[in-house]
Image (spheres, grey):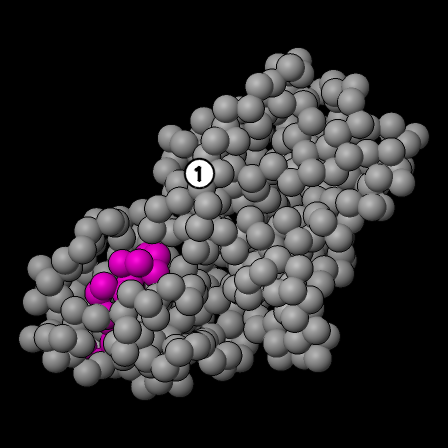
Amino acid sequence: MVSLAGCNTQSVDQKNTTGSEASGTGKILIATQSPLSGSQSAIGDSIKTGAEYALNLQKEEFKKLGFDLQVFPQDDQADPKIGVSNAEMLSANQDVLGVVGHFNTGVAIPSSVKYEEAKLVMVSPANSGVKLTEEGKKSVHRICARDDAQGPKGAKYAKETLGVKTVFLIHDKTAYGQGLVDEVKAQFEKDGVQVMGYEGITQGEKDYNFVVNQVVPKNPDMIYFGGIYPEAGILVKQAREKGYKGLFMGGDALDSSDLIKIAGAAAEGIYFTSLAGDVKQTDEGKKWAAEYEKAMGKKAETYSVYAFDSMNVILNGVKEAIKTNGGKKPTREQVLDIVHNTKDYEGKFVKVTFDEKGDNKFADVFIYQYEKDATKFLGKIE
């Protein structure tokens, strides 16, 4: 993956305002923020590329309106400090009228403080942490489900469909990972599933045998992990090497083809909940995926699809704001107001209506399972 962190050094000649005054140029930038370098770069790149594909399809339409539409990718490196620094830079550049991102809730929450100050609209394809939209920021939106839907539905699927009676819970100490596991834990306890352990690990380490050695002797029906695919791959591989035969489940952040590269044969059988359905379930989706691969030179991942729709929600708002503004470049506040009031927008793959908090009323939760060299879509969790 190519790191685009160098974009942060672009010179800014626009006024450093809060977005109440638009730049006089005909340039419109829509930024992305996701990890484009480091261990989470595979999924971060899929977000950037999905958003870029959506924007590319509308460049000519904007050109006819008199605007040079460009994607402006930023590498937040899954690091809150870098995400905030990027957000400050984006806020200072008045050509930036929206942000698609982030991937990590722990990066999105502090970065959103800067977006709110700048009246810069953010639409996330992936952030599921409950706290993100509970803080009352008008600028913050997501088209995906929250962890207080994802966690309980995953736990209920484990009990009712997979027959799980005992579970060991592991999280990665992040806002996303621990938040998800806490939602899962509450549902398991409510449903009478025995929680045999609750432990945290540190992202970026290569050996998790200290926790695996606690799990294996207890032999739970399932290990549930709240965290990202690099650590999940190591955990499941080391657990299998120690003889663990039970089930392994996690949330949407396990959804990356790189997990198979990390875990090898141990990846087979892993269950994970997802905030997006399988694009290839319909003929239209199959056609879109083929066109995407041809245009972008890589296969669409799950979050490529939601980044595509997140970008389109923002661009729809920008177009409506241009009309409202008499064909002139709109202010950020005009774009924000229209996006925030999005109702019954028919995205390519998800319908979008934002509530007052910025959550999508039509968000669903889905379930997948890893096979030998791919993932299998099992359906929507009701």
- The quarter of the displayed image where residue 25 is located: top right
Q: Residue at x 57, y 35 (%)?
A: 137
Extent of the magenta region: 220-236
**Residue depicted at 9% across the width and 59% down the height:** 210
Residue drawn 27% across and 69% down? 263
Categorize mark 1 by other alpha carbons within 10 Å: few (<14), some (14-19), many (20+). Answer: many
Determine whether, in the image, residue 382 is placed left or right of residue 20.
left
Q: Residue at x 45, y 56 (%)?
A: 43
Q: Say left or right for 224 vs 50.
A: left
Q: Position of residue 175 (x, y in %)?
A: 35, 46
User: In this rendering, is residue 322 above or below 377?
Assistant: above
The quarter in which the C terminus is drawn is bottom right
Q: Nearer the viewer, residue 213 or 256?
A: 256
Q: Position of residue 61 (x, y in %)?
A: 85, 46
Across and down, in percent, residue 96 comes to 66, 30
Picture coordinates of residue 2 (x, y %)?
46, 45
